[in-house]
């Protein structure tokens, strides 16, 4: 199944890894949603991006573990019930956020487009640091990758510099869309990547 990329979620540790894909996303009118640091970097490059930071950071432990974000990654676009539930969830969270932030224009306040599922996810994990372990474990990033793996029939995934380059070239060839075979190959690699990451972490305890 061919999927047109309309909304993409980006959260990367090495910001320069997305330099190549940004002009392609702009060319095809893709709306970019990103964690705060990534969103600021994208804006510094002259592109538009909406921050998805919810504000509940816990010293960096809970940057992307947000119900709405995960729902937008996991929603099955072929099921109307999923889309209806996503719209309701977005409406509730948007209303609550606006009430909490009255008089404080927070970057986490999103618009009605936050009810739309993501069509692609680009997540690059932070490097593990033996001197700061297990604090350096990337929980949110791995969660987003696994969510995208589960929903590969609806969402494209890139998880490192090489896979980001492959996504960029694929979007160029397919005029802003992704093919099922490409999404399948990407999640196979991502699954092995996550397994290797977990094995590495196990050896660090």
Image (cartoon, rainbow, N blue to C red):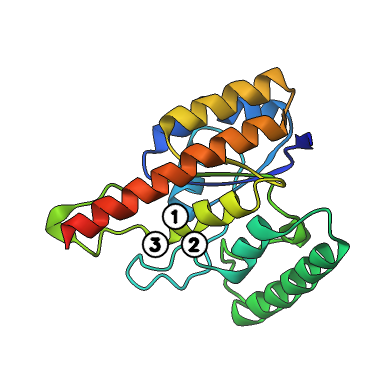
| Mark 2 secondary-structure assignment | loop
Residue 64: which numbered mark, if any? Answer: 2
Asked whether residue 48 appears in the rendered view, the answer is yes
Q: Nearer the viewer, residue 64 or 48?
A: 64
Q: Nearer the viewer, residue 177 or 48?
A: 177
Crowd class of label 1 (few under 14; some 14 to 19; many from 20; radius 10 Å): many
Is 47 left or right of 81, judged from the image as shown?
Answer: left
**Is the C-beta separation of discs 1 and 3 under 8 Å?**
yes
Q: Quadrant of the N terminus?
A: top right
Crowd class of label 2 (few under 14; some 14 to 19; many from 20; radius 10 Å): many
Q: Nearer the viewer, residue 163 or 149?
A: 149
The quadrant holding residue 100 is: bottom right
| Mark 1 secondary-structure assignment | helix
Looking at the picture, how far across and down is residue 177, in whole percent?
Answer: 73, 31
Asked whether residue 51 appears in the rendered view, the answer is no
Is 5 left or right of 36, judged from the image as shown?
Answer: right
Spatial separation of the CA atoms under disc 1 and disc 2 = 7 Å
Residue 139: which numbered mark, if any? Answer: 3
Task: Report which residue position mark 1 lands on.
Answer: 141
The quadrant holding residue 4 is: top right
Crowd class of label 3 (few under 14; some 14 to 19; many from 20; radius 10 Å): some
| Mark 3 secondary-structure assignment | helix
Q: Nearer the viewer, residue 14 or 144?
A: 144
Height in image: 153 above or below 67?
above
Q: Quadrant of the C terminus?
A: bottom left
Q: Residue at x 57, y 57 (%)?
A: 147
């Amino acid at each position: 199944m061919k999927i047109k990329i309309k909304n993409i979620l980006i959260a990367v540790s090495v910001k320069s890894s997305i330099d190549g894909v940004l002009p392609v996303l702009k060319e095809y009118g893709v709306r970019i949603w990103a964690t705060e640091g990534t969103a600021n970097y994208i804006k510094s490059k002259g592109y538009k991006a909406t921050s998805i930071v919810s504000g509940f950071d816990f010293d960096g432990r809970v940057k992307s573990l947000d119900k709405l974000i995960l729902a937008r990654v996991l929603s099955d676009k072929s099921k109307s019930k999923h889309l209806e539930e996503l719209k309701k969830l977005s409406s509730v969270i948007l209303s609550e956020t606006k009430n909490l932030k009255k008089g404080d224009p927070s970057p986490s306040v999103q618009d009605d487009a936050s009810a739309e599922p993501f069509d692609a996810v680009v997540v690059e994990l932070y490097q593990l640091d033996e001197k700061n372990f297990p604090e350096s474990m990337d929980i949110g990033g791995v969660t987003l990758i696994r969510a995208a793996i589960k929903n590969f029939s609806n969402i494209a995934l890139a998880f490192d510099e090489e896979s980001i380059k492959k996504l960029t070239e694929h979007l160029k060839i397919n005029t802003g869309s992704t093919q099922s075979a490409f999404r399948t190959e990407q999640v196979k690699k991502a699954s092995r990547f996550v397994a290797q990451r977990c094995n590495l972490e196990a050896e660090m305890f």
